[in-house]
Amino acid sequence: MQPVRPLRAPSLPRLAAASLAGTAIEFYDFFVYGTAAALVLGPQFFPTFSPMAGTLAAFGTFGVGFVARPLGSVLFGHLGDRRGRRPVLVASLLLTGASTVAVGCVPAYGTIGAAAPVLLLLLRFLQGLGLGGEWGGAVLLTAEHAPAARRALWSSFPQVGPAVGFVLANGVMLALSAALPGDAFAQWGWRVPFWAAGVLALAGLWLRSSLTESPRFLQIDDHARVPLVEVVRHHGRLVLLTAGALAVGYAVFYAVTTWSLAYATGRLGVSRTVMLTCVMVAVVVKGALTPLMALLGDRYGRRPLCLAGCAGCAGCALRMLPMVALLGTGEPVLMFLGILGALIAFITMFAVIAAYLPELYEARVRCTGAAVGYNLGGVLGGALTPMVATALTDHGGRVPWGVGVYLTGIALVSLVCFALLPETRPAPTPVPAREPATG
């Protein structure tokens, strides 16, 4: 067994910062596609379709990224369980960054015909493949360095990364949308955020070049020969439960950040600038609340917070139906409040997931098991939600109540799955009793 060096005090903050930055960059790559799919990809790559069918087709390519994420978690999870968590961070960032830059270079349908959507589909698949490995590597490297009593807190910093990536992606889109005329944005302006991903990827590689390997991985004597086989054989039920439990988080997040953009700008006539601003401000608040919710997870346990957040999503009278009703008003302040309410319920669960999932799996297959469960939840909740919500909106009135019912149904399924999972919070270390004073 290889010796493990004790960590110096500053090491953990640096590690958390590097993990957060890298996760933010990779999720920037992933989210910028979702925003483009909601705003411009339909007319650019599916011009022969009706506006509604073009949006559905664009969201279909968006969903391919989610289908690829479990495959990426298997591929990079094998690498992480066999060779270490650190190599996963470098390889996944390279793949995601390169494929994102390439999306910005794909000619439109009018230039190369049917090859355009095919290339778009392939590159989106590669994006998802890289992101499927990113989460497992970044979260495990942080969680396995962190002290048990504050594991949820330190592990929550990579979970702030998606919020930062989303704000970066939409901030660039917002600036370009406001600065460029409509035709210029639709023709070439939307490509700039994809090209910027190359610079961000290089910055992320520099940040991660100094990271050390997880001490828990170095303590493993007998590495799994084929981690996926062991996960399926010994943890199959656990993978299905975690995937079902996380589905509602993905469904809520992408209903808010992707479908609502298309719905508000297309059906309600809300400007892109107003809608992107509402979503971005709500996501900033969500990111700021993430460490606070994680502290509650360290104090009260992972499972209680997950159940509370899931119940918040399931309570249609408090969360889901008011969100779509407030979107229907077209008023920016009311739309912001509806979006924020749903995201607070979401982050109550996902703030502690980075500690909860690794604790559910044994260390020798943890990178594969935790990442596969996490990304399968993305397929169940995130891949289909924009398409289903768009289809339900097309058959509904101004207020798409069907979307609220759909999200509430997913929340109830996730609530049952969370109820079947065990608590994993480490028991607090007892404080030695003081000896009575003598003399």
Image: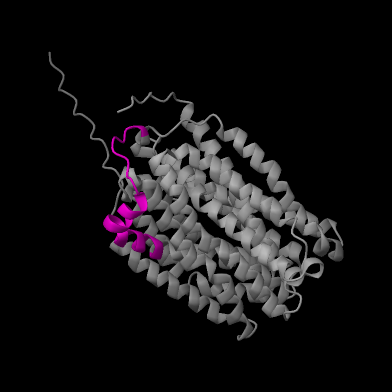
Whether residue 5 is situated above or below residue 84 in the rendered picture: above
Q: Which quadrant: the C terminus?
A: top left
Question: Residue 376: which quarter of the image?
Answer: bottom left
Which of the 4 image quadrants contains residue 324?
bottom right
- Can see residue 32? yes
Q: Main secondary structure of the magenta part?
A: helix
Measuring from the top left, give residue 126's x and y in whole percent: 59, 56
Answer with left or right where residue 423 lies relative to residue 95: left
Q: How many marks?
A: 0
Name the outermost residue toward the top: 439
Chain part drawn in magenta: 218-244
Q: Position of residue 317 (x, y in %)?
A: 47, 74
Residue 285: give x, y in percent of width and height: 58, 53
Residue 326 horizontal/vertical position (percent): 61, 73
Residue plotted at (69% across, 68% down): 117
Quarter the N terminus occupies: top left
On screen, residue 137 versus residue 366, left or right, reads: right
